[in-house]
Image (cartoon, helix red, strand yellow):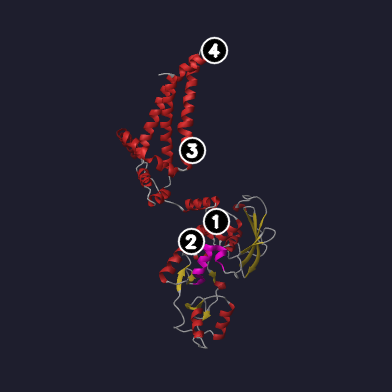
Amino acid sequence: MNLFEHLALLAVLVLAAGFLSLSEIALAGARKIKLKLLAEAGDERAHKVIALQAQSADFFAASQIGLNAIAILGGILGEGALRPFFLEWLTLFYDGPGRDNVAFALSFVFVTTLFVLFADLMPKRLAMIAPESTAMAVVRPVMVVIRVFKPLSWALNKVANMLFRVFGVDTTREDRITFDEISAVVEAGAQAGVLQKQEQHFIENVFELESRAVTSTMTTRENVVFFTLNEAEDSIRQKIATHALSKFPVCDGVIDRVIGYVDTRDILVQLFNRQSRFQLNESSIRKVLIIPDSLTLSELLDRFRATKETFAVVINEYALVVGVVTLSDIMVTVMGKWGAPLEADQQALQREDGSWLIDGSTPVADMKRVLELDALPEEEHYETAAGFMMYMLRKVPKPTDSVEYEGMRFEVLDVDHYRIDQLLVKRIGARGAPSATQADTVAD
C-alpha cells in the first residue's frame, strides 16, 4: 500500500476508536431520570439505553477490546507507513547517525497525537455536551459491537467478576438520589434561568421539612393566646378582637392543662344565628391535637393529613406546653415571606447601613438564608437565633453581649426576662475569619 492508502486506513481506525470513546462516555454520563422521561414519551431508544446501563459490563468489555485492538493496530500501521516517510524527509537535511530513531520517534508522536486528539479527547468532550441524546444516537451500533465481541467479552467479564469477588468489591450500581444532588440540580436550574429564585427557595424549603423540628416554626409558649374554661364572654370577645387568630386553645386554668381549642368560625356562626351570648362548653370546644416537640415538620404534615386538623399543641417530655403550631405556620416556612400575612412583623429586617435586626425566635434556617451563611457551628444544639447566641456565649445573655462568626458580629440588643428579643448583626470583615471556635464573647 502507498502512503495515501495507509493514511486512509489510519483515519478509519481513528474514527472507529473515536466512536467507541464517545459511546463509553455517553452511556456512562446519560442521566437515568432524563432517560425515563424520554422513554415515557415513547422513545424506544431511551428504553434500550436504560437496559444497556443496567447491564453495562458487556459493552465496556467489548469497548475496551475494540479500543485496545485499534490502538495496537494503529501503532503498527502508523509506524510502518510513516517511518519511511519521515526517514526520507530527514535525509534532505540530515544524514548522520540516529536518523532511524528520530524517524521512529516522529511517527510515534504523530500517531499518538492523532489518536489522543481525534479518538479520545474530542469525542469524549462532545459526548459530555449532551450525553442522553448522544447515547440514544449510538445505542443501535453499540448493540452490534456487543454482539461481535460477545464471546471474548463474556470470558473477560467472568475473570473480572472472579477478581472482584476475591477482593470483596461490590459492583452493584447505586441509583439513590440525595437531597444534595436535587439541591444542586435546582440551583443549576435557577442559574440557567429555568427556575426563578423564589421557586428555588420553595423547593429547598419543602425538602427542609424533613429535618426541621416543629419548634422551629411554632408560636412559642409566651406568645400563645388562650382561653380559660371559665373565662368571661367580654374577655373572650376582647382577645378575638385584639388578636387576628382563627383558633384559640382552651385551658383549665393554666396553659399546661389544655382541654381543646375553639375555632372563631363557630363563634361567627352563632352570631349569624343571632345568639347574643357565647359560652365555652362541650359543644363549642373541639378536640385538640397534641404532638411532641421532637416531631419534624414533615411528620406534622402527616399528622394533619391523617386527623384532618390544622392546629396542634406542642408539648415537651415533661408534658409542658411549649407552643402551638398550625398548617399556616408550615406554609410560611415553605413560602417564606410570600406566605406570611402582610401585617405580620418581619423576623429579619435589613437596615440602610447593611446591618440586620433579627428576632430572637427566628429559625436558624431562616437566619442563615438572610445572612447568606452556609452553616452555623453545631446546629443540632439549637433551633433559633436566640439559641445560637446562648450556645455560643455559654451563659444567659444580657444586652451588649456579642459573638463573632464568619466575619459577622452578632450582638444582643434586647432581653426580656432572660429571653433574647432581638439581635443586631453587622459585617465586620471577610468571611472565614474568625472561626466559630474563636468567637469573641463579651464577659459579664
Question: SS class of the residue under badge 3?
Answer: helix
First of labels 3, 2 by sequence position: 3
Q: Main secondary structure of the magenta part?
A: helix
First of labels 2, 4 by sequence position: 4
First of labels 3, 1 by sequence position: 3
**Mark 4 residue crowding within 10 angstroms, few (<14) / some (14–19) / many (20+):** few
Q: Is residue 309 above or below residue 252?
A: above
First of labels 1, 4 by sequence position: 4
Q: Is residue 428 left or right of residue 278?
A: right
Q: Nearer the viewer, mark 3 or mark 2?
A: 3
Q: Which residues are magenta?
A: 320-340
Where's residue 76, x and y in %? 41, 22
Marks 3/2 in contact by CB < 8 Å: the verdict is no
- Identify the amino acid type marked 3: Arg
Q: Quadrant of the C terminus?
A: bottom right
Question: SS class of the residue under badge 4?
Answer: loop
First of labels 2, 1 by sequence position: 1
Alpha carbon of mark 3 to alpha carbon of mark 1: how far? 30 Å
Where's residue 143, x and y in %? 34, 39
- Identify the amino acid type marked 2: Leu
Residue 125 image label: 3
Residue 209 image label: 2
Q: Is residue 402 above or below residue 90?
A: below
User: Would you name the residue on which mark 4 appears?
Assistant: 94
